[in-house]
Amino acid sequence: MILGLMSSETFKAHWSLNARRRIFYKFPQGAAPLMALLSLLEPESTDKPEFGWYEKDFTEQQAVTTAIDVDSGPFSTTGTSTPLTEAGWTATINTIIRVRLEANGSEQYLVNNTVWVMDVPLAAGGFTQLYGQVTSIPATNAIEIRLLQPVAAAVLNNQNQAGLNVLVIGSAYGEGVVNNSSEKWSPPILPVNFTQILRKKFSFPRTALKVGAKFDKTGLYKDKAKENSLRHMMDLEKAFLFGTKSSFVTTIDGEDSVVRTTGGVIYWLQQYEAAFSIFRGGDGVSVGPAAVTLDSDDDKRIINNAAGTITPKSYAKYLERVFRRCNNKAQEKLVLCGSGFLETINQMYFGSTTLNSNLPLEATYGMNVVRHQTPHGLVYYKSHPLFNLRGARFYYDALFLDVHNLIYRPLNDSDTKMVDRSMPNADKRVDEWITESGLELRMPESHLWLRNVRDYLPA
């Protein structure tokens, strides 16, 4: 369980191992629950302010068809791009035809693969299935297939045939034939992020340090140090959620200084949706898939929900989408959300037994969470104080996180600590909380940002 990595007693025995964990132990209901949970997972230090991680998806051997031109569908005669009859074509078994695919779609196939062109519309209405063996790969966006069954009913060849799935269903070789197909291999991708230096300084005149206060006779130091530690955690929390990756050189006191900011969760979701995304098979620059813009697209990970409403059915689809990819430890998601979103979900499931808020505190480290058992996995809702700030920018939003795919990456010997910044000749004490760290976010498709959930419709 994400929120039950160790028992409360085990956790208590380890609470002083790092400053972030110590702050969480004292203030579990504070404004930085993500930092609190990441403090429980082992960090992976980096020896460079620019760090990366290798990531590889297991390629699904399928592509979708595209139209040959503005009038015709994906099917043409062998050896050419001359479209087959738009109004309907038929063919005998063993006929070879060319199938137009999405950009770089043919990279998913080998000669002698058997394929299934799924749910092809017929001129008379209804659908048929085309089965074939790949005989050649003439272009990066086309394959030629030998039909394994006759096409007796007329198949349409207009733009309605764009978007058909062409799935590899095996391979078929002739007797005694040498395997002359080249092998397929794709290297892993290398996302890169930066560490970010965050600092929170606080100071006292020497005299003020010596004076007691009504609420604490020992003075103001402990309370001010505590408050600044919480503010520092909030800065880290916001950087890891909303920060954007950047690096630039500026001049400070006459010297060049490099300023880096780390890309947070939202940044990486944007990179997943962007045109030419490396996470979806592109090169990140000019080659690859188009940007994802529609909430209905299965690759969409920032759901804008312009209508402001959801239904049980639409919400279930979003849950299925985010659970489609998970870490290898737990089929669970943590949802950091605004109170408005949580209230809408509560109303939608009012009276349902799938929501449970009576979780033992020792299993959740004192955090108030609501558990939702879905067919796809467990969801833990946590109302996030930063989502409920004045102005309600995120009041109706929810950020679904696969916690085990979030890695805290501090620079060597630069995790959160308090250091003495006092000057020898100054009649005051100056301390500072300082952290240099960044976020490694694996598999952006395992996370999702659902926005603007103000109300629900019963159906």
Image (spheres, helix red, strand yellow):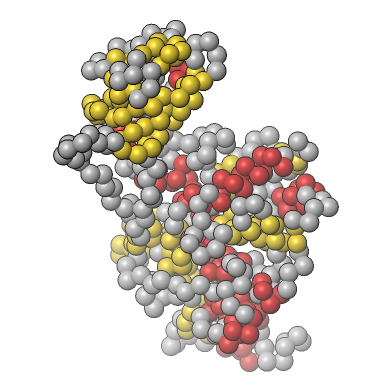
96 or 317, which lies in front?
A: 96
Residue 342 location (% of width, % of height): 73, 53
Query: Is residue 248 visible from the viewing direction of this image?
Result: no
Q: Is residue 283 above or below residue 28?
A: above
Residue 217 location (% of width, % of height): 72, 92
148 or 17, which lies in front?
A: 148
| Residue at x 29%, y 14% (from the top left corner) | 77
| Residue at x 70%, y 64% (from the top left corner) | 369
Q: Is residue 170 above or below residue 196?
A: above
Residue 330 location (% of width, % of height): 55, 63
180 or 38, which lies in front?
A: 180
Query: Is residue 325 visible from the viewing direction of this image?
Result: yes
Q: Quadrant of the C terminus?
A: top right
| Residue at x 53%, y 52% (from the top left corner) | 447
20 or 102, which lies in front?
A: 102
Residue 287 horizontal side relative to residue 349, left or right:
left
Q: Is residue 186 above or below residue 290?
A: below
Q: Quadrant of the N terminus?
A: bottom right
Residue 121 location (% of width, % of height): 49, 18
Residue 214, image quadrant: bottom right
Q: Is residue 456 above or below residue 355?
A: above
Q: Residue furthest right?
A: 351
Total numbered circles: 0
| Residue at x 63%, y 85% (from the top left corner) | 9
